[in-house]
Structure formats: structure tokens, C-alpha cells
Image (cartoon, coloured by chain):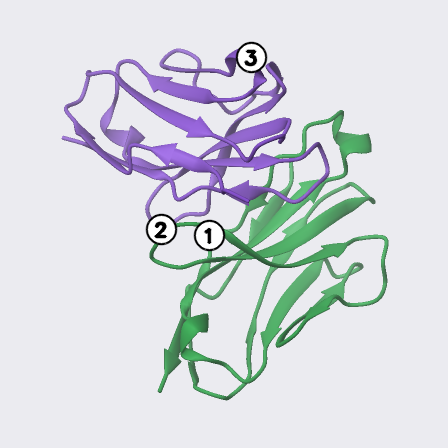
Chain colours: A green, B purple
Amino acid sequence: AQTVTQSQPEMSVQEAETVTLSCTYDTSESDYYLFWYKQPPSRQMILVIRQEAYKQQNATENRFSVNFQKAAKSFSLKISDSQLGDAAMYFCAYRSSSYSGGGADGLTFGKGTHLIIQP
Amino acid sequence: EAGVAQSPRYKIIEKRQSVAFWCNPISGHATLYWYQQILGQGPKLLIQFQNNGVVDDSQLPKDRFSAERLKGVDSTLKIQPAKLEDSAVYLCASSSRINQPQHFGDGTRLSIL
């Protein structure tokens, strides 16, 4: 079974600064997807960014980028120019490819990191 | 496009009572998921449907939890009887098909007294 570990229960950053959230995972599969989700107090999980394991290039979405190290099984999220609206819980998640999982593609989540933005 | 709809938003019951949650996925989405999120943890998959068939229910406590997706659209998740440890947020998600991004609803917060 796959596991996802987020070792930072809480992180704090000044507005406009850069912050990096850490995530490591364990899997024996070679083909999979990794995600970062944001969960504000409204509880809805919002997809921030995703990475396909077969792609060496790190994904970017505006102010959000990842550092994907497949051999080290590490997948960190960098948020540049932090804004007050970025404050939320951030979850790292893993998903098997549908080919290797027989169609089962539910997400495996870490415990989350609470991101605080200081004005 | 309307998002994933869930109801109720909150539910409070006593232990050993029954409860049901409802989910309406995004129109046309064939795949539907139920997750349980206990306070301080990430969501855990309970069950995945593809149309009205079950793809994965390996983490569903089948002695007390049941779920159905009749006609391959709406879904209900039931707990009978509820235990204190079932206190959690129950999230529903849908995707257009397997291997596509999952869109989440706002969840139902269940409190067991």
C-alpha cells in the first residue's frame, strides 16, 4: 500500500514571501500521479497542482510550483509571493495510474500542513 | 458548470443511530468517490463507483457502512449503527472518468454524541 507523509503540521510565512511545503511518499509502482490540494475552512478540496511521475519536468501553475524528485520519492510545493488567500490546509496526495490499479484511482492523502500567512 | 452537491451540511446524531448522506456529482461524471476525513487527518477513500458499479470498497467498514449509486448518478452513503469514531467530515468527489481530476463537494460534518 502507498503512504504519504507530510512532516510539517504547521508553517508560517510573511505575506509576499516564499514558502515550501514538504511531502514524501512510499510506493513500489513506477507510474502514478502526485497532487497538492488546498482545503480552506469551507472544507472543499481544491486542486492546486498535479505531477505525472513519468514527466521529469516539474509542474508549475502561476505562483505554485513543485520540486519532484522521483528517486528520493519527494514532492514539495513552493508558493511564491504568498497572499492572504493562500492560508489553508494543504494536502499532498498520491494516485495510482488506472492501468496498474485496475481502474481504482482513489487518492491517498497525507495528514496535511496548516499554512498561516502573516500580514 | 454546477459543482458536486452534498447534503446535509451538518448532522448530529447519538451513537447507535442511523444516518445517511447524499451526493449529486457534476453532470456527466461517471466516477464517484466517498472519502472520510477525521479531524486532523487527510481524507481516506471509502468507496469508488464507476457508473453504478463498485470499483473499490476495500476500506469501507462493511459491517456498518453501505453505499449505493442507483442509475449511475446520485449516491447515498449510510452508517448503521453509528459509533463515536465515525465523527468526521464525509466528502464526495466526482470525475468525468477514471484517471481524470477529481472535483470535491463541501462535505457533510457528522458529529456523534
Q: Decide: is B21 above or below B43.
A: above
Q: Position of residue A56 (x, y in %)?
A: 85, 63
User: Could you tell me which secondary element the residue under label 3 belongs to?
Assistant: helix
CB under 8 Å between discs 1 and 2? yes
> What residue would you read off at disc 3?
B71
Q: Quadrant of the N terminus of chain B?
A: top right
User: Could you tell me which secondary element the residue under label 2 belongs to?
Assistant: loop
> What residue would you read off at disc 2?
B40
Other residues around mark 1 within 10 Å, as few (<14) / some (14–19) / many (≥20)? many
Between residue A39 and residue A22, name the one nearer to us: A39
The part of the image, by quadrant, that contains residue B84 is top left
Residue A26 horizontal side relative to residue A29, left or right = left
Q: Position of residue A12 (x, y in %)?
A: 41, 78
Q: Report the residue at 39% width, 11% height from top.
A: B63
Q: Which mark is residue B15?
A: none
The part of the image, by quadrant, that contains residue B9 is top left
Task: Please count the marks in the image.
Answer: 3
Residue B16 horizontal side relative to residue B92, left or right = left
Q: Earlier in the sequence, mark 2 or mark 3?
A: 2
Q: Judge depth for marks 3 and 1 and give the one in front.
A: 3
> What residue would you read off at disc 1?
A111
